[in-house]
Image: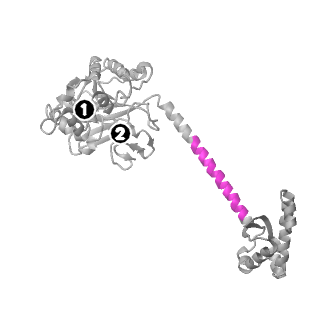
């Protein structure tokens, strides 16, 4: 037996001959121990498929009761192998039944189906990303209607938020043309008009100068303007440290006295920059008090803006009160306060990625799926106390790719009814 195995090693035909010879010898040993019926029922359907040092693989080519064979005759088979082979082997059976073939076929089909789904999913992602990139090169328009008994002839306000130096057309020509056709009574920029990483603010300053030729323009700072001007997180503690102030000594005038080249550029362009300040405008026969907050962080708002904001709310109560801030966190952190007749803000970019029926996927302050869990104000119209609050999705198409969330120009029409 050893001589046969040695002579045939190295060729396929030789291996087959060796396996057949070994199996014939094992078969003969089993035939001495098993009844003729058992040999027909089992051994005639077994074939030695592989043989190596320490292991043997036996094919079972019919749908036989393998468990019954092993229960009755496994020891006889092992004994026969030990008598034929000069070494111990561990036996593994491969039952190549019709059921097994069907299972393998089903497994192959399942793998192919999974690969198809993955490929289709990948293709869908590519399509969605491509469509999003194309759509984000232009902006959509969202109209809101607000009622107030303080307004006689109607009032149209256009809100531009979170532009981050984005241009729509050469020199923002497409944006300017659309704003002019919408004929606003007031244009407001609710923060992050510039990006802190840009070398200068010329794109936004040039836009504001041309907007000021269409309607009065009010501008409040967002976190990017604050980073450029103050280099400060704008929380109460960080402002106290920077300004050397504390309880009883805080004065928001110190913030307006800070060296601020950006404000100088914007005001030279004809823009009203409101840093915890109020401005009264006569717009289409309506007196409108506009308050813009610099310290929109909840911890710093009342300590640094409380006095001027209270005057804004309480003085001339017959005037329409418009409150502008960048971050919407005030309205949930201080839910019991009054905020005027209308509040406009941005900052959240609408969650950047929006899903149908779910809304924004993530917001920095409120975490995952804030609209689904109603944990914060991310996009659209809300109410804080009796005040309508509109959170813009923002107009930038720079940075993180917006998906199902095109840049947004907000138009608010205020009427008596």
Determine which of the numbered discs, if any, sits on residue 294 in the image. 1
Q: Is residue 329 left or right of residue 136?
A: left
Q: In this view, does 166 lie to the left or right of 319?
A: right
Foreground: 109 or 18?
18
Secondary element at tag 1: loop
* In this view, the mark in front (1 or 2): 1
Q: Where is residue 3 in the image (x, y as percent from the top left)?
A: 87, 66
Determine which of the numbered discs, if any, sits on residue 57 in the image. none
Magenta-colored stretch includes residue 106: yes
Determine which of the numbered discs, if any, sits on residue 380 in the image. 2
Q: Position of residue 375 (x, y in %)?
A: 33, 48
Magenta-colored stretch includes residue 115: yes
Where, quadrant-wise, is the C terminus in this rendering? top left
**Number of marks in picture:** 2
Where, quadrant-wise, is the N terminus in this rendering? bottom right
Secondary element at tag 2: strand
| Chain part drawn in magenta | 100-123
């Amino acid at each position: 037996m050893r001589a046969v195995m040695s002579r045939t090693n190295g060729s396929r035909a030789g291996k087959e001959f060796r396996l057949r010879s070994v199996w014939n010898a094992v078969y003969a040993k089993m035939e001495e121990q098993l009844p003729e019926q058992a040999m027909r029922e089992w051994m005639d359907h077994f074939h030695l498929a592989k043989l190596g040092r320490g292991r043997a693989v036996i094919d079972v080519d019919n749908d036989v009761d393998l468990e019954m064979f092993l229960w009755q005759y496994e020891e006889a088979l092992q004994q026969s192998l030990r008598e034929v082979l000069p070494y111990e082997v561990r036996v593994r059976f491969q039952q190549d039944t019709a059921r097994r073939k069907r299972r393998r076929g089903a497994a192959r089909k399942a793998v192919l189906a999974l690969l198809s789904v993955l490929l289709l999913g990948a293709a869908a992602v590519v399509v969605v990303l491509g469509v999003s990139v194309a759509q984000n090169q232009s902006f959509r328009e969202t109209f809101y209607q607000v009622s107030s008994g303080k307004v006689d002839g109607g009032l149209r306000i256009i809100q531009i938020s979170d532009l981050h130096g984005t241009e729509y057309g050469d020199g923002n020509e497409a944006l300017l043309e659309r704003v002019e056709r919408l004929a606003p009574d007031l244009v407001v920029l609710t923060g992050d008009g510039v990006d802190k990483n840009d070398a200068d603010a010329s794109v936004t300053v040039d836009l504001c100068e041309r907007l000021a030729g269409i309607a009065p323009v009010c501008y409040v700072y967002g976190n990017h303007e604050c980073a450029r001007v103050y280099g400060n997180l704008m929380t109460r503690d960080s402002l106290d440290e920077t300004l050397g102030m504390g309880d009883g000594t805080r004065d928001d005038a110190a913030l307006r006295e800070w060296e601020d080249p950006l404000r100088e550029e914007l005001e030279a362009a004809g823009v009203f920059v409101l840093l915890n300040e109020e401005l009264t405008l006569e717009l289409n026969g309506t007196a409108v008090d506009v308050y813009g907050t610099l310290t929109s962080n909840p911890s710093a708002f009342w300590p640094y803006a409380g006095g001027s904001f209270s005057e804004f709310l309480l003085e001339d109560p017959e005037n329409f009160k418009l409150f502008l801030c960048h971050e919407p966190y005030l309205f949930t952190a201080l839910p019991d306060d009054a905020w005027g007749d209308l509040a406009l803000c941005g900052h959240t970019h609408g969650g950047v990625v929006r899903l149908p029926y779910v809304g924004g996927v993530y917001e920095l302050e409120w975490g995952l799926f804030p609209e689904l869990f109603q944990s914060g104000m991310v996009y659209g119209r809300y109410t804080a106390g009796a005040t309508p609050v509109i959170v813009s999705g923002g107009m930038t198409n720079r940075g993180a790719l917006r998906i199902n969330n095109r840049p947004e120009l907000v138009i608010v029409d205020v009427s008596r009814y």
